[in-house]
Amino acid sequence: MIFKQIADMISMGLLVLDEDLNVHFWNRWMALHSNITADEIVGKPLFDFFPDLNEPNFLRNCRSVFTFGNFAFFSQKLHRYLFPFRPAYSDRTPFDFMQQSCTMGPIRSSDNRVQYLFLSVSDVTEVANYEEQLVEMNRKDALTGIYNRRFFETSLQQEFKRSLRHGRALSLIMIDLDYFKRVNDLHGHQVGDDALRAFAAAVHSRLRESDLLARYGGEEFACLLPETNGPAARTLAEELRRMTEETRWVCREVELRLTISVGVAESRPEMGGFEILLKKADDALYAAKAGRNRVICYN
Amino acid sequence: MSETRFSATEKDLLQELMNIGFGQAAADLAQVIGLSIKLSIPDIQLFKTCELSRHMTEEMDGEQEFSLIEQYFLGKFQGIALLALPARSGKKLVTLFGLQDQCNWSSENLAMLEKEAMIEVGNILIGACVGKITELLNDVVLYSPPRMRIQDVRDSNLPNNLFAPGSLAISLKTVFHFERKKITGQLFLIANQDSIAWLKTALNAFMEQYE
C-alpha cells in the first residue's frame, strides 16, 4: 500500500514489464505525461502504445535484463528520450520532447528468477538545456556572437583532416580590420564594439551555412571554407573587402569608414598539418597588411 | 589479514567457479547480442590497493592504445569493473549494435556515438560477468551507470570510498574476443577487501552444496 503510493507520488516515471514486454505496472507520472491511463495500458504490449521502442537496441537491453539480471542505462546524450512526451515544466526549452535519462533493471521472484523488468524515467530537460547553453557559450565569442578562436581551431583541425581524407578542397580566409585601434581611440570602445558586431554580422550573412566564421583575436577574424578552392575563396575575400569599403557603417550615430586586409590560403596535401594552412593564411594576411585594404592569396 | 588469504583449494575453486560463470555469461551474451564471444580462463590475483597502477601496467599491453570503460558494482561483492577496448574499436561496435541507424547523428557526433557503443558493450559484458559470479554465489549487485574513463588507469588509484588505503584488492581478469568483429579486449573485475572475505565464505557455502 505504502509502496504503491510512493510509486504514484514520486516525481519520475516508473513502469514494469513482463517477459513478453506487456505492461504490468504504470505509475501516475507515466499516465500524466503520456495521457495513457494505467487502466488503458496495463496488460497490453508496450509496443502497441510506443511502437518506436520496438527496435534492436531496446530489445537487446530488455534481453540482457531478463537473461542475466543486468541493468541498462539509456543516456539522454545518446537517446534523447525513450518516451515521446512534451516538455513538462519549461516553455523556453529548445527541445520538442522531454529529455529523459532512463534506467532498466531486474525485478526478481522469491526464487531469484528475473520475473519482470522495471524502467525508471527521469526528466532531465532542464539539465540538458543548461548543458547545451554551456556548450554553446563555450564555442561562441561573447561580443560578436560568432564562434570563438578555440572552436575555430578545433574545427580547422577536423576539416583539414577531412579534406585530406576525401581529397576535397578547403580554404581559409584571415581578416584584419585596418587601423581599428583608431576607431576605439577616437570614438570609444562602445562604438568599437558595435562596429565589430556589425562587421561580424555582415560577413556572416555573406557566408554559406557550411562555412565557419570566428573571431580570432581583437579585430581579427577567420573564415573556414570547406569545399572551396583557392580561386573561389579569393573571389569571396575580394567581395568581403569591397563590401566593407563600400558600406556606410553607422554605430551609435557615428559614421565609420572601414577597410580590411585579407589573407587567403588553400589547403594542400603536402602541408602535413592544419598549422601550416593557418600559417600560410596568416603570412598572406601579414603581406596584405603592408598595403591595407587588399587581398593577398598565398601562392 | 589471514581471512583475506586464499588457500590453494579456495583459489582453484574460485577459478573453477569463474570458468562456469564466464562460460554461461558467454552463452548468454551470444543470445543477447547475437554474436559469439570467447572469454578466456580467468586469471585471479591479489594485490595491495595502492599497487593498482603497477598491477594494470603489468597486465596491459603498453604498446596498444585503449579506451577504458568503468562501472561500479555494489553488493556483498563490490568494486570496480574496468573494460579495456582497443581505442579504434568504437566504429566496429557502432555497426555491431546497429547504432548507426540512430537518427540525427551528424558526423561531428560520430565520436560520441562510438563512445556510447563502447559504453554499451561495457555495460552488457560487465553485467553478464559480474551477474553470473554473484548469481552462483547467491548475491545480487547494483551497478552505477558505466562511463568512459578519462584518466589513464595505469597512472591512478582505486577510489578511496570502496578501497581503503593499505587494504587488499582482488582482480579477476578475462580476455574476451568478439569473433566476427575481430575485437579483443580485457575485462578486470577489481573487488575490495570486504568482498574477498565474502568470497571465501560464499565459496565455502557453495562447496557445502556438493558435500
Image: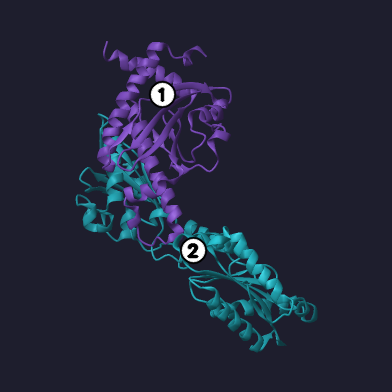
Q: Which mark is residue B43?
A: 1
**Chain B is which colour?**
purple
Q: Which mark is residue A163?
A: 2
**Residue B17's spot in the image, x, y percent?**
33, 21
Q: Quadrant of the C terminus of chain A?
A: bottom right
The residue under label 1 is which amino acid type? Asp
In the picture provided, is A65 more to the left or to the right than A250? left
Q: Among all residues in the image, which is located at the extreme right? A: A185
User: Quarter of the image holding residue B156?
Assistant: top right
**Residue A50's spot in the image, x, y percent?**
26, 57
Is any atom of residue A150 visible in this view? no
Question: Helix, strand, or loop for circle 1?
Answer: strand
Q: Nearer the viewer, residue A284 or B124?
A: A284
In this view, A208 is above or below B29: below
Residues indicated by labels 2 and 1 sit on the same polypeptide chain: no
Distance CA(mark 2)–CA(mark 1): 46 Å
Q: Which chain is cyan?
A: A
Q: How many marks?
A: 2
Mark 1 residue crowding within 10 angstroms, few (<14) / some (14–19) / many (20+): few
Q: Which residue appears at 54% of the width and 65% of the height?
A: A268
Is any atom of residue A23 visible in this view? yes
